[in-house]
Image (tube, rainbow, N blue to C red):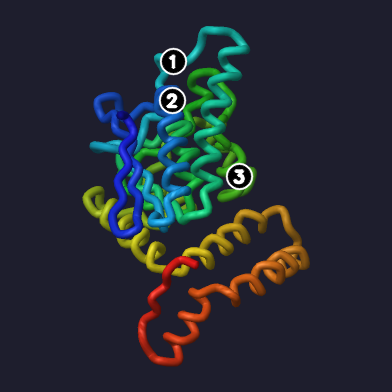
């Protein structure tokens, strides 16, 4: 398998495992990534997810050897594979952390941006290289980059096709932390464990609020949370949180 998944203490780590090709993603691997995220989504023991690459790179993006040929019909099929994979990452209701070292190019950068948090190395190299091979952005790249940066900065990065370092990504708000390479996975695991120990349903509902926010005005956002919070006060984790506060102890959240 070119995609590996392991679960420890409520954290699923999904690894793109093709280091000899800089973890370039084949069509078959797209389906494997989708399946790995669906399995993590369905597993009640999984409460947070890390997406990373084996070896020294996150991923060089799509396998160029599979590009082209087959006409419009085949191209549309490849796009559907890509979009199913992208949705499996973006639409999971559990916190997802991208741990990025080395290169993170094209669709793989879009996958990282679809995660909730990105932790990267100082010297990581991000790039949307679509212009260099005569393609428009895909994988949700234009949408995600615009959401983070606004239209003008997003256009500059995509139009130029230039590399963005891990340090610049963090400065722009495209990554939460830029660290030494050997510290990236440890920080991702620390964050994932923190999220896994949190009340799962509360984080799930918070994620829905963040996802909905760009399309809402202030009143709509208030109405949205008004529909959520009455449900949350009936959860076991809410009762445990209040009781632990009164008893001056750490809460033991169970995820419901």
The quarter of the image holding the N terminus is top left
Mark 2 or mark 3, whichever is nearer to me? 2
Q: Which mark is residue 62?
A: 2
First reached walking from the N terminus: tag 2 or tag 3: 2
Q: Choose between 48 and 176: the one closer to the eye.
A: 48
Whole-percent x, y for residue 243 in the image: 46, 87
Q: Name the element at disc 1.
A: helix
Q: Give the residue at x 54% y 7%.
A: 70
Q: Name the element at disc 3.
A: helix
Task: Give the side of residue 49 with respect to residue 227, left or right.
Answer: left
Q: Give the residue at x 45% y 92%.
A: 246
How crowded is the residue under tag 1: few (<14 C-alpha within 10 Å), some, or many (20+)?
few
Distance, label 1 to label 3, CA atoms, is 28 Å
Mark 1 or mark 3, whichever is nearer to me? 1
Q: Give the residue at x 42% y 69%.
A: 254
Distance, label 2 to label 3, CA atoms, is 21 Å
Task: Give the side of residue 196 with respect to residue 92, left or right.
Answer: left
Q: Which residue is mark 3?
A: 146
Q: Which residue is mark 1?
A: 66
């Amino acid at each position: 398998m070119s995609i590996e998944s392991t679960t420890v203490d409520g954290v699923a780590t999904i690894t793109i495992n093709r280091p000899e090709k800089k973890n370039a993603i084949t069509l078959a691997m797209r389906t494997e990534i989708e399946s790995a995220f669906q399995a993590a989504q369905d597993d009640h023991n999984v409460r947070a997810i890390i997406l990373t690459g084996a070896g020294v790179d996150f991923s060089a993006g799509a396998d160029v050897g599979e590009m082209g040929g087959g006409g419009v019909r085949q191209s549309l099929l490849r796009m559907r594979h890509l979009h199913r994979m992208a949705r499996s990452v973006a639409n999971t209701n559990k916190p997802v952390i991208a741990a990025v070292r080395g290169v993170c190019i094209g669709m793989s950068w879009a996958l990282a941006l679809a995660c909730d948090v990105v932790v990267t190395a100082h010297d990581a190299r991000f790039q949307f290289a679509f212009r260099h091979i005569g393609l428009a952005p895909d994988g949700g790249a234009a949408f995600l980059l615009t959401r983070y940066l606004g239209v003008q900065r997003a256009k500059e990065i995509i139009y130029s096709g230039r590399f963005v370092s891990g340090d610049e990504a963090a400065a722009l708000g495209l990554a939460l932390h830029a660290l030494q390479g050997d510290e990236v996975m440890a920080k991702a695991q620390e964050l994932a464990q923190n999220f896994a120990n949190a009340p799962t349903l509360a984080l799930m509902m918070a994620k829905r609020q963040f996802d909905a926010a760009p399309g809402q005005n202030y009143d709509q956002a208030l109405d949205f949370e008004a529909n959520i919070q009455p449900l949350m006060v009936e959860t076991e984790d809410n009762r445990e949180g209040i009781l632990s506060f009164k008893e001056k102890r750490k809460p033991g959240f169970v995820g419901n």
